[in-house]
Amino acid sequence: MPADFLSSAEMVHCLAAIRDKFLHDCMTGTRRRVLPDDVCASGQYFDLPQRTQRGLHGTAAALRVVGAQTASSDLVRSVTRGIVNYVRDREGIEVTLAEHDDRIRTIVLDKLRHDSASTIKQAEFLYALTFVPNGLAECDDLKTAFSNRLLTGGTDDGQGWGFILGPDQVPHPLATAHALRALARNGHPVDRWITATKQGLLGRAAQPRRNVPEAGVDCFLLQVLVETDALTGREGRLVFDGLWRLLRRDMDRPREINVDFFDGDRQNFVRVPWQLHLATTAAMLRPYRRYLSGDVQRPLQQIAADVLEERGFRYPESGEHLSTRTYGILYDTFSQLSGRTGARGHPDNIVLRVISSVDTPLRMGRRLLRLTAALLAAIVLAAGLWSWAEEATRSWSDLAPNFISSAVLAVLSYAVGRGGNR
C-alpha cells in the first residue's frame, strides 16, 4: 500500500477544473458563434476552439458534468438549458446550418442518422440527462425519447444490445453495459437483460484471463453490474480478481483500448478507459487490498496532477488533443470515488489515514523479515555444507535436515515478499 493516496479534497479540485473546462468550451470558440443564442454544444476536443464540430459524445459529456452543478449559478443554468435545447432541436439546427451546401447537408443527415442508431451515444446522453434536475432544465421528454430508443433497440432474444440499435444486431458487452447503466439509472427495469449479461461475465471470469481488450471491456461491465446490484459481493470479487491478475501490470502508464464496430459499411470505434473502471471497481469490491495499493493510487494521482496542469490529461491512444469524452468519464470516476454520486465501498477518509499512517512501518517490518529469513536460509545451508565437509565419514542423508531447514526459510522469505506485493 502507498504511504499516500488521492484524497477526496484533491478529487474535488479535479471536479471543479473539469467543470470549468466544459463551461468554457460551451461558451467560447467558433462553435459557439455559429449556433443560435440559446443553444450550447460541445465537440470532440477542448483544445481546438476554431473547430465548429459538435456531436453527442462530447455534448453528453458536457451535460453529465455541467448538469451535476449547483443550480444557483446563472452560467450553469444557461449552459445546461442550452445543451438540452440543442439536443431537443438538433436535427432542425444542423440541417438549417447546412442548407446552403448540399454536400455538407448529406454528411450532416448521415451523421444524425448514425447518432440516432448508436447504442452508446444514445445511452451516454440518457445517462447524462439523469443528472439534470427539472429545476435546472425541463428534459423529461428527452429522457422518454432516449429511453424508448434503447428499450426498443435491444436484441429479440434478451441477450443485450449491439453497437447499432436493432433487434437483429449481434449483442456486445460494451454496448450492453452502456444501455443497462443508462436505463437502470432512469428507473427502468432491466432484469430481462441482466441475466444473460451476468452469465456471460461470470462465464468469462471462470476461465483464465488472457485477452486484454476483452478484459478492458469487462472492467466497465463489472462496474455497471455492481452499480445496479446485479452481482453479489462474492461474484463481483471473483470477476475483479481475474481482471486484476491480467491487467495489474498495465496500470503503471495511461492505457485505454479501442473497440471497433460497423454501421453498415461505415467503420467506427469507441475508446474504453479501462484503468478508470478498474480503479472504481477496486474501491467498490477491494477497497483496502487493491484500491489503496500503489498500483491504483499512483495512476490516479498522476491523472489528477495532469488534469490540474495546463497541459491536461490525455491517453496516448487518443492522440495529442484533450478528449471531452475522456474528461466526462474522469468526472464520473472522481465523483464516484469521492462519494459524490452514491459510490459503494469507497473507504472512509479517516480509515484511509489510519491505514496510511501504519503502512510504512508495516512495509519496513515485512522487508526486514524477508531479508532475515533469506539470510538465515543461506547461513543454515552454508553451515550444513561446511560441517558435512569436515566429517570423516560422509553420508548424503546427513545433509537432508540442513536442506529442509534452508528450504523452509527460503519459502518463508518468498511468501513474505509475495504478501507485500498483493
Image: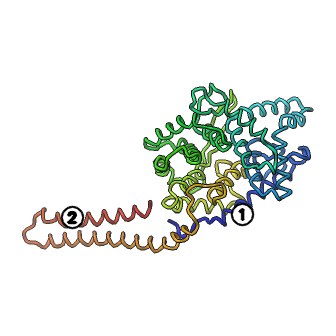
Task: Tell me where residue 271 appears, x and y as whole percent.
Answer: 64, 44
Instruction: Identify the image quadrant of residue 124.
Output: top right
Task: Tell me where residue 279 appears, x and y as whole percent.
Answer: 57, 55
Instruction: Give the secondary structure at mark 2.
Output: helix
Q: Are marks 2 and 1 in contact (CB under 8 Å)?
A: no
- Tell me which residue sits at (89%, 37%) in the image: 97
The answer to whether residue 321 is visible is no
User: What amino acid type is highlighted by mark number 1?
Assistant: Glu
**In-front residue for pair 225/31:** 225
Task: Tell me where residue 348 appears, x and y as whole percent.
Answer: 57, 64
Instruction: Identify the image quadrant of residue 382.
Output: bottom left
Count of numbered circles in the view: 2
In the drawing, does residue 23 fall left or right of residue 233? right
User: What amino acid type is highlighted by mark number 2?
Assistant: Phe
In the drawing, does residue 251 fall left or right of residue 376? right
Q: Which residue is identified by label 2?
A: 403
Q: Which residue is identified by label 1?
A: 309
Task: Tell me where residue 388 appears, x and y as whole percent.
Answer: 14, 70
Label 2 crowd (10 A; few <14 / some 14-19 / many >=20):
some
